[in-house]
Image: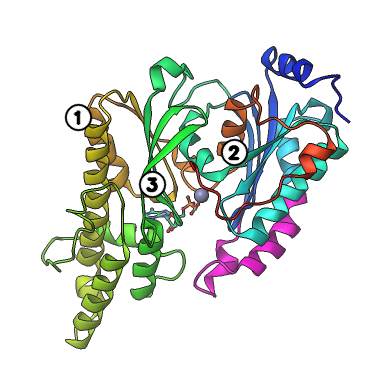
Amino acid sequence: MSIFQSQKEELEFMKNKNIKILAIDTSCDETSVAVLEDRKVLANVLASQTELHKKWGGVVPMVARRAHQENIGKCYLEAMKRARLKIDDIDVVAATYGPGLAIDLEVGLQFAQKFAIENKKPFIPVNHMEGHLLSSLALNSKGHGVSESLDKKQLFPALGLLVSGKHTEIILAKDYGNYQKLGKTLDDAAGEAFDKVGRMLNFGYPGGPIVSEFAKKANHKESFELPVPMRSSGNLDFSFSGLKTACLYKINSLRESGRSDKEWANDFCWEFIECVVLSITEKLGEAINQNPGVKSLLVGGGVFNNETLARRVGRLARKHGLKYLLPEKKYRSDNAVMIDLAAYVHAAGSEVLIGKKAISKVDRVPRLSISD
Ligand code: KG4
Ligand code: ZN
């Protein structure tokens, strides 16, 4: 039973006030809960599990599930406390329903569904990748942010570039919710390649940030002839497994020659990143050329914490006169603020579910895509 007589009444209600959305994401190894008032972040609580998974060298879904179950209630209470809100103040509840690890997605999704049903709140299921795509739309408590305008005429059509631990995608966004995938990785995602190269270099988990730190100390004395992937593939797809294998062979041969990692690791990390960034920016450049009407570039995903990637993509955007929507650092990796933002742009649309029957029907979709 909805608190409203009709969905129309509900939608009118949401159009006319500053809506407060509670959002949850447990798609991988972060338990995250956020509360936003429209696009303004009131609370952003995150329980990271990095330390838990370190000893396994990667995310163990069952270990993550247990940690999500332990943390979700506490994160919710903390978020409500920081936002200074009571349950009654929440207008809408949102949660990630995919993509992600099935048994982990379930924890946040079910928590949010139960909350929405028990408290008679409307519910919006969110695609985690749409969250990454819109993560630059967050505003701080004073209403300032990367993009202060949501005006569709200024932003769309847009190109999206998502570079995370599981995805490397170029997207054509014609509107909020209207996405077409132009290119994707055929095997490993860029973040996965960073992590695997990090593992080869005994950097622990996650390797990506450490590979980036080592590269900053490069003195460019040595070249390793690593390949730039998919240069002449003639499409916008990516592939990072060949580069990863080339790294493995090179690292083995450097070690077999008796040289210590210390001598070459900084330069090696720099060259690896150069190959990844070149592959991404070349494909993005092609995508921009193929879509001349595009006005902005929406980016997101944990690999954008790498400054070279963030800077070079920015340079490309400037060269083509595109508005570059790079999220603040804290919203590049997984977080629930971005889930809130994706819910917000749909808060007056048909994605809003009302009543126990409709809400409880939503199931997690581990391989959910941003477009058909
Ligand atoms: O977006 P994200 O937090 O989670 C997914 O949805 O996958 O991305 C995680 C990925 C990991 O592969 C991690 O190593 C990578 O982002 N990452 C980085 C950096 N920080 C995180 N990669 C390169 N340089 C970084 N500074
Ligand atoms: Zn993510």
Q: Main secondary structure of the magenta part?
A: helix
Mark in front: 3 vs 2: 3
Taking the magenta stretch, the answer to whether it contains residue 82 is: no
The residue beneath circle 1 is 319
Mark pair 3, 1: CA separation:
21 Å
Give percent across and percent down for residue 19.
Answer: 69, 22
Mark pair 3, 2: CA separation:
18 Å
Q: Secondary structure at mark 1?
A: helix
Mark pair 1, 2: CA separation:
31 Å
Taking the magenta stretch, the answer to whether it contains residue 52 is: yes
Dividing the picture into quadrants, the one containing residue 126 is top right
Residue 333 versus residue 198 in the image, above or below: above
Dividing the picture into quadrants, the one containing residue 179 is top left
| Closest to the observer, 347 or 178 | 178
Mark 3 or 2, nearer chain start: 3
In contact (CB < 8 Å): disc 1 and disc 2: no
In contact (CB < 8 Å): disc 3 and disc 2: no
Packing grade of label 1 (10 A; few <14, some 14-19, many >=20) is few
The residue beneath circle 2 is 339
Identity of the residue drawn at 25% across and 48% down: 235
Q: Is residue 100 left or right of residue 153?
A: right
Q: Find the residue positioned furthest to the top.
A: 16
The residue beneath circle 3 is 169
Give percent across and percent down for residue 340.
Answer: 61, 34
| Closest to the observer, 108 or 144 | 108
Residue 74 appearing in the image: no
Identity of the residue drawn at 73% across and 43% down: 78
| Closest to the observer, 343 or 253 | 343
Give percent across and percent down for residue 120.
Answer: 85, 32
Residue 228 appearing in the image: yes
Q: Secondary structure at mark 3?
A: strand
Range shown magenta: 47-74
